[in-house]
Amino acid sequence: MRVAGKGLLTGAAPVSFTFDGTSYQGLQGDTLASALLANDVRLMGRSFKYHRPRGVLTAGSEEPSALVRVGKGSQAVPNVRATQQEIFDGIDAASQNRWPNLKYDVLSVNDLISPFLSAGFYYKTFMWPRAFWEGLYEPFIRRAAGLGALSGESNAEPYEKAFAFCDVLVIGSGPAGLMAALTAARGGADVILADEDSRMGGRLLAETEAVDGKPAAHWTADILNELKGMPNVRLMNRTTVTGAYDHGTFGALERVGLHGPADGPRECFWRIVARGAVLAAGALERPIAFPDNDRPGIMTAGAVRAYLNRWGVSPGREVTIFGNNDDAHRTARDLADAGVRVAGLIDSRADAKVTGDFPVFTGGKIIATRGRLGLENITVEHEGGTRIIRTDCLAMSGGWNPSVHLTCHMNGRPEWKPEIASFIPRPGAIPGMVVAGSAQGIFSTSGCLADGIRAAGKVLQSLGMKAPTIELPTAEDQTYALEPLWVVEGKGRKWLDFQNDVTVRDIRLAAQENFRSVEHMKRYTTQGMATDQGKNSNVAALALLADATGRGIPETGTTTFRPPYVPVSIAAMGAGGQGMGFAPQRFTTSHQASHERGAPMIEAGYWYRPSYFPRPGEKTWLDSCNREVNMVRASVGVCDVSTLGKIDIQGHDAATFLDFVYSNTFSTLPVGRVRYGLMLREDGHVMDDGTTARLGDNHYVMTTTTAAAGLVMRHLDFVAQVLRPELDVQIVSVTEQWAQFSVAGPKSRDLVNAMLDNHVDDASFPYMACGSVNVSGVPGRLFRISFSGEQAYEIAVPARFGGSLYRLMTAQAESMGGGPYGMEALNVLRIEKGFITHAEIHGRTTAFDIGMDRMVSLKKDCIGQTASRREGLLEDTREQLVGLRPIAAEAKLTAGAHLFDKEAEAIRVNDQGYVTSVCYSPTLKTNLGLAFLKRGRARHGEVIRLVDHLRKIETLCEVCDPVFLDPEGERLRG
Amino acid sequence: MRITCPLCGTRDRREFTWQGDALAIHRPARDAGPEAWDNYIHLRENPAGKTRDLWYHDPCGTWAVAERDTVTHAVHSTTLVTEVPR
Amino acid sequence: MVKLIARTPLDGLTPVTIGTVTVTEVTLDPMTMIAPFKNQLAKVDALLKAGDGVGFPAPNRMESSDGVRILWAGQGRALLIGADAPAGLRGLAALTDQADASACAQISGAGAVDALARLVPVDLRLSHFPVGQTARTFVNHMAASVTRTAPDAFEVMVMRSMGQTLIHELTEAMTNIAARNA
């Protein structure tokens, strides 16, 4: 219920919202949890395993129980913490993991059989019969257990990622964080202050106390105002720092658009790089494990104060409080002061000093609770006897655990501090980060304010900056006293991990069954493995394990906290990578023209290249491909080859450099000529191939395959800088500078001449010539090279003219009976000629294997030469490149199929080789293949069996030379 | 993780490509023999602690040697490979 | 006799204005990569200063004078923009025409730096990345050159073939920024 005059939302606008189909009213600034509690809704979810009715346990991001689905359809977000979700007009939230509804959940039958479902139950029970696991057990368990479900639809909403840099990152905006940010900012540092709450201030918003003589919330607003006015400060609310990584890098999740109607980015995943950091993440209150401590209405004492003091909501009308420490008493006092009936304060310590106008039970324990869908009463055992107290809200406090999580992300292990019965961070666990305030185990407001100043000063000093003098504001300085209380024995289940339904009994069972290591216990019981990662329960579970195994807590150790601190949606982490953001698209200058011709595009690396150019009447890609191949063989075809890597190599040592990176020799290449080159890796295998032209004495231009362009560039830089720094050579990529087109076919010269200002002929420009030309006054380059086996040229112009030249050339080609050809035809043309691509030079083949061993010059050193001579790489038994022709021309060949002797069984030990490329050759009217075959070059003429087990294909083939067409190369030189 | 390009300054690791141990600088002579070549091409230490390796800063085309620690992840220094004493 | 028509890399894709941020195309003509040969840097620097008024830039810097700019472009190389390389450089440096190699966009206006902070993993705070600073880095997945030309204006250069992706990425970032500020 809302308490008149309480909280910070006084005067806030009303907001209508829906939960499980029912409309409610809340206030601007409410979370879903506070608004539901204001409407006396306590039941908010069902537990993971037993479908136990659950309400809220906390008031923050650590919430394990009140998880809801927000939104509908593809926009639905599951497992949203109701304690964090702000309400807005029209928000539609629903409970999860229940059927048919939250109050009557069929699968709560699991709860009745819970004695059989304890830790390790699945491991022990569903082992046999084995076949039942996949078909029966697993689907059932998966259906029965679980949290919210994804919609299964593509999420089209925008998510962002972003980078930020600062001197000092302050994590958390409670008293320690605010003072740390103020100190660092006044000291002149660039500061980012991040807090996961929509409103900054941390516990200062949740307590009734004064700072500097003002109500804490007012003081907070004043400090935030000062920070907001400073140009060196960036305030990031709704931003959870999720991980601490190497060298001052932090991950952070900002909820950008989740607190309003959908428009713009929903979340942003930040990478923040900070020179120093202050962790002021505060502390989390832990529950006490007493019998049936999980009923809706039972929550932490600090959460009850937060609902009352910040949101003006009392989670109950008759509230009881159960704690082992002085801090819990504040809850009783605040409630009583606000006029809420306090039905009893139970302190487990016999000597606790409590004053207040409410019943007090010292040395007391809760031994039972009742109320199926919400708490109705509790049974208290105390010094004076046993008593049943009617109550609809129980505030419990087992003490506070410092939020050490981020300090563990780089393998830091926290230390046990007996005074607070909890862990504190080990100093220096994250280089450059200083921990302050209650995250460091300091629990008074005054202590936190002072510690924030100290921590920021220390960080400033490490950055070589001077810490300013900051006056410590006056504030509450009570000592925090507690006596550990981990469990109250008694009949009934004592819940530890509310989200994964782990009980005290499960921990003891794990110890009894010898899962004594904390990491084993965790996995056996699933303690701490839910989305809250055990924030509320791990310390208590460790204490119980320590007790059950007869060890101390420090010796028992902790499990490892890993990033992220809160769940991060994949959409946020992968932001920028959705749809077209997945990879850059590279378009050639002829892309538009090809697109207009209806050419389907094929991706080659990041490039998009035309697959084929359909013409009316052609029914399949093969019809178009066959026509394009015939066209090139009979007249002329044009193909954009700009995607091949082009690298300019200049300098006095350019020739020496090329001799070193290529297996063959380029220093002997005359100016104005082109040579095919083979590039090896240092281990003697083929890296790449291509042609290199000599444009001047000290000037070459190298081409690489499309796929390996980046790799080769990096390799050339490696050779120039790492291996041969003495060479005077400069390497510059010109791939993008030039648009380059292949013109192939018997009429190619006529087409090229139609474009050139000065005509070329065969005598002055023979096969493998190159030189400068003018294309309509534009300086270009011409190369007489061929990847089709036909007379062919490649013509290059500056890229701005590429689109225009392509249109002119394709039109001219069509007037000559030719036209454009695509990747499919290009592939057929090269297979007919036995030219290799990366299908053949796939990283495991040598120059010897592809029949090019004579290209490894022994007259000079080159990359890979020594290793290429290694034992085993030059043996006749190796798989060697061959051609394959099916005995029946139409019989199928498939790439990836394996080769076997005609009569041998098609099993691995009989494997003779494999097929790398196949095509239908319209020129030879047969299917063709390239393959690697053991001793292949000596087996031409032999009949071999191709077997493709996947596609169920078996074909008898004749082994032949890989060059199927024009082995003498007469067409090339025509 | 952040690495300092000797020319561009400290950058996110995503801008770099790793290429293994810096012993790649010391390429044996052609006739150094199989053992030297086997060492050069294949054999690498896998130290828990200090290591020297080659990194390529892709956007600026610079090869550098980084001295770093595989246990603490600290990067002690980065040097242009062309300025590393040979 | 054929007639070739020139087309700029971002033709038809710019200008784009979303919220307070505008993207326009920058033409780079002429643009020459200058990579001095061994021990020629001082001579190259002197010839450039004499010829075009800008010296060979220090790493991460851009120099400009009278419409001529020179941009550091990686180890031992710089891009001279807006003027031809002085004739005397031939033989002292590798000179490579790059006028058609890049797509270049100017992104400017209040929030331009926020849009780039969605894409570029580099510290772009004015105090750390002042006017005249240039970085070889990435724009999302694309290798890029990012240069600050004014407190709220940058030039972003990527491979010519990636021009469409550049505009797509910038537009998406600008849309998100505008939605946040709405």
Image (tube, coloured by chain):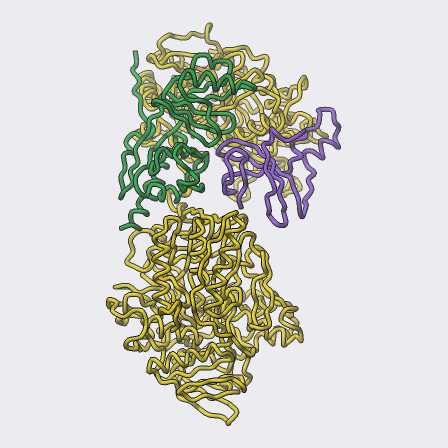
Chain colours: A yellow, B purple, C green
Give whichever of A25, A348 is nearer the camera: A348
Count how many numbered circles sit on residues in the image.
Answer: 0
Q: Quadrant of the N terminus of chain C?
A: top left
Give whichever of A7, A152 is nearer the camera: A7
Give whichever of A823, A48 is nearer the camera: A48
Residue at 41% from the left image edge and 76% from the top image edge: A53
Q: Residue placed farthest to the top in the image?
A: A763
- Displayed quadrant of residue A936: top right
Residue at 46% from the left image edge and 62% from the top image edge: A176
Asked if residue B62 lies left or right of residue A374, the reply is right
Q: Position of residue A935 (x, y in %)?
A: 66, 29
Establish if A436 lies above or below A209.
Answer: above
Asked if residue A601 lies left or right of residue A129, the reply is left
- Displayed quadrant of residue A663: top right
Q: Position of residue C69 (x, y in %)?
A: 39, 24
Establish if A144 lies above or below C64.
Answer: below
- Displayed quadrant of residue A608: top left
Q: Position of residue A493 (x, y in %)?
A: 51, 80
Q: Residue placed farthest to the bottom in the image?
A: A385
Establish if A198 lies above or below A542.
Answer: above
Give whichever of A844, A913 is nearer the camera: A844
Residue A204 visible in this rendered orientation of the protein: yes
Establish if A901 lies above or below A848.
Answer: below
Q: Position of residue A847 (x, y in %)?
A: 62, 26
Residue A739 visible in this rendered orientation of the protein: no
